[in-house]
Image (cartoon, rainbow, N blue to C red):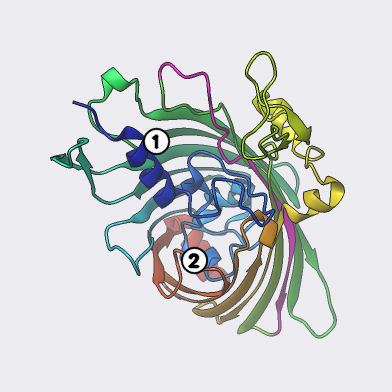
Amino acid sequence: MKIRLFFIILCALAISRTFGQDTEPDDGSRVISTAVPFLTISPDARSGGMGDVGAATTPDTYSMFWNPAKYAFIDKTFGFGIGYVPWLRSLVNDIGLASVVGFGKIGDKQAIAASLRFFSMGSVMFTDNDGNELGEVKPNEWAIDATYARKFSREFSGAVAGRFIYSNLVPVDLANLSVQPGMSAAADVAMYYHHEMEIKGLSNASVDFGLDISNIGVKMSYSSTSTVRDFIPTTLRLGPSFTMDIDDYNRISISLDLAKLLVPTPPVYLKDHTGSADSTDANGKRVIYKGMDPDVSVVKGMIQSFYDAPYGFKEEIQEINLSVAAEYWYNKLFSVRAGYFYESKYKGGRQFFTLGAGLRYNVFGLDFSYLIPIKNNNPLQHTLQFTLLFNFDNTKKAEKAAGTN
């Protein structure tokens, strides 16, 4: 019995790859696509309310996804968080990203953390060529990871993380069609700099800088026979943040992130005499007209991503996404947030504003975010994202702090 495998995989990819088009559009846009794009979805409502900023913001439970080196500077002993991101809620109600993360400090200089992200694509009905239903399945993807962070000085820390990624887009018995789940292993490398400042008129101030290279990992394949393997979304994220305590009750932070995919840019292929198909060489390989061959190793692809754009430096700049945000805290109990995200129209065209709020009471924390699209529809538009947090101090530390006060 033949199954419409090609159609099913395209549908699954259309659901999961919502950060840009997977083929080169006629208007000249040049979107970079990868496998498992769910790894680029903001899993927490704090960063979700700040335009996806997180490289150098103050450390929190969800630092794992933005810069794990920040854990070394977190002011709690241990904690965990639970989050949920509804996806394409205006169309369906069973697609979303769930996450859980936990961390623990080891003394004053070290920290460990682990997390799990699970992306459900809802229910998909499989049919044969005659339209007969073969059964309903639920494609899904998930990633589990762990990190170790350490202070190297009073102002500088670093971290490394390991990650296992599993992508099951066609979770049925299709062995005769050589279909299999995609799997990959990846690593993150991160650094964080925190410098306290004295500014007249302010009770306290600090400047921070973060750098994170995430998802440095092996390519992924969904076939046991094909030699085609897709890059996973290796991403460079860096940026500064400035925080100032106006007085004992009011704190304001301003942050900026720059992010770029470290995977090859699609080249422009030479067309044949008909102008409707790509020209091929004697080996059947498409002939590149502009740009560089994207079929390279992971490490070479990361290096090549800085200079392989077919249209030169201008296109390389277009591949950098920008996020800027502000956050206000009152008495470390209540916060309001706002952010802006920009992506070039030639690389996906996402542009949106975000709003957010947070509440902290004793060990309990709750964050919300809301996204307002400017250009192009967004899977998160007009939906509420939330994160539930619990942070704890050990008894001795809490008693010492109470005695000091």
In the image, which disc is placed on residue 378?
2
Hey, which residue is sitting farthest top in the picture? 283
Let me know if residue 241 is in the magenta part. Answer: yes
Residue 254 at what x, y percent from top left? 70, 72
- Residue 23, above or below 295: below
The quarter holding residue 388 reads bottom left
In the image, which disc is placed on residue 280?
none
Instruction: Give the SS element for disc 1.
Output: strand
Residue 351 at what x, y percent from top left? 62, 69
Q: Which class describes the residues within 10 Å of circle 1: few (<14), some (14-19), or many (20+)?
A: many
> What is the span of residues highlighted in magenta in the rendered image?
224-246
Front residue of this view, candidates 305 and 226: 226
Mark 2 or mark 1, earlier in chain: 1
Residue 364 is at least partly visible in this image: no
Q: Is residue 58 left or right of residue 174?
A: right
The residue positioned 71% from the left and 34% from the top of the image is: 302
Front residue of this view, candidates 219 and 280: 280
Front residue of this view, candidates 31 and 260: 31
Front residue of this view, candidates 195 and 349: 349
Which amino acid is tagged 2?
Asn
- Residue 27, above or below 217: below
Residue 98 at what x, y percent from top left? 36, 53
Residue 299 is at least partly visible in this image: yes
Q: Is residue 86 left or right of residue 228?
A: left
